Image (cartoon, grey):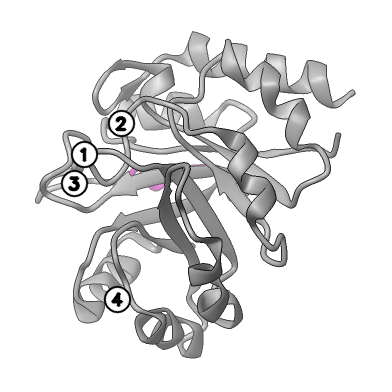
Amino acid sequence: MKELAVKVCGMREPENIQEVAQLPVDFLGFIFYAQSPRFVGDHFVLPTNLPDAVKKVGVFVNENTDVILKRVQQYDLDFVQLHGNESVAQCEEFFRLNISVIKAFSVDDKFDFSITAPYEPFVNYFLFDTKGKNYGGNGVNFDWNVLRKYQQRVPFFLSGGLNESNVANLYQLKDLNLFAIDLNSGVEVEPGKKSIDKIAAVISKINSIIK
């Protein structure tokens, strides 16, 4: 199985952000959606001494393009993650501005993967999360077997309640275009605060199955 990138999403507290950034992670996600329990808040201060190799991802839900662009500049974001019902046209706007995009979709057993096709020219990655009452952070898996219906043309992040126990099953996806795992509620102490030990345990488990 190929090596997987690791994203830790829903970060908020400066000290916790710095601690997580010292782990072998590739992306940190910051949620700019006021209705999320992991919302960074109106006065969020992002530490400036993060490792260059760790990419900063701003997570937005059905947000105005101008607001997103302001946050990209304010926090020097490397990616925008669009986690709502954003249009192809909005993704294209960011593409034309050379802003990297992760487009998320909420997946259940009946999800029609053909709706991802029009987005393909304008995104760097897709993210497939569990469909639930919230836009992400629902803490449960979807049936990964449905990912075999996906066309696999754009690499994707896998999200949805990932933890030390269930990442062992990622081996079943070894022949798919899985690029990264997205950790959030499954490695938390409380909403917005991550457990260093839980993240380290997940990474260790992943390393053991890709050898």
Is 140 on the left-hand or right-hand side of 154? left
Residue 77 location, x and y as percent? 41, 61
Of mark 4 and mark 1, the one earlier in the sequence is: 4
Q: CA distance from mark 3 to mark 2?
A: 23 Å
Residue occupied by mark 2: 138
Secondary structure, mark 1, is loop
Q: Residues within 10 Å of mark 4 (few under 14, many from 20)?
A: some
Of mark 1 and mark 2, the one earlier in the sequence is: 1
* Residue 84 circle label: none
Mark whose residue sits in front, 2 or 4 = 2
Residue occupied by mark 1: 133
Question: Which residue occupies the extreme front position in the image?
Answer: 110
* Residue 69 circle label: 4
Q: Residues within 10 Å of mark 2 (few under 14, many from 20)?
A: some
Residue at screen point 48% across, 70% down: 115
Residue occupied by mark 3: 44
Q: In the displayed structure, would residue 197 be above or below residue 68? A: above
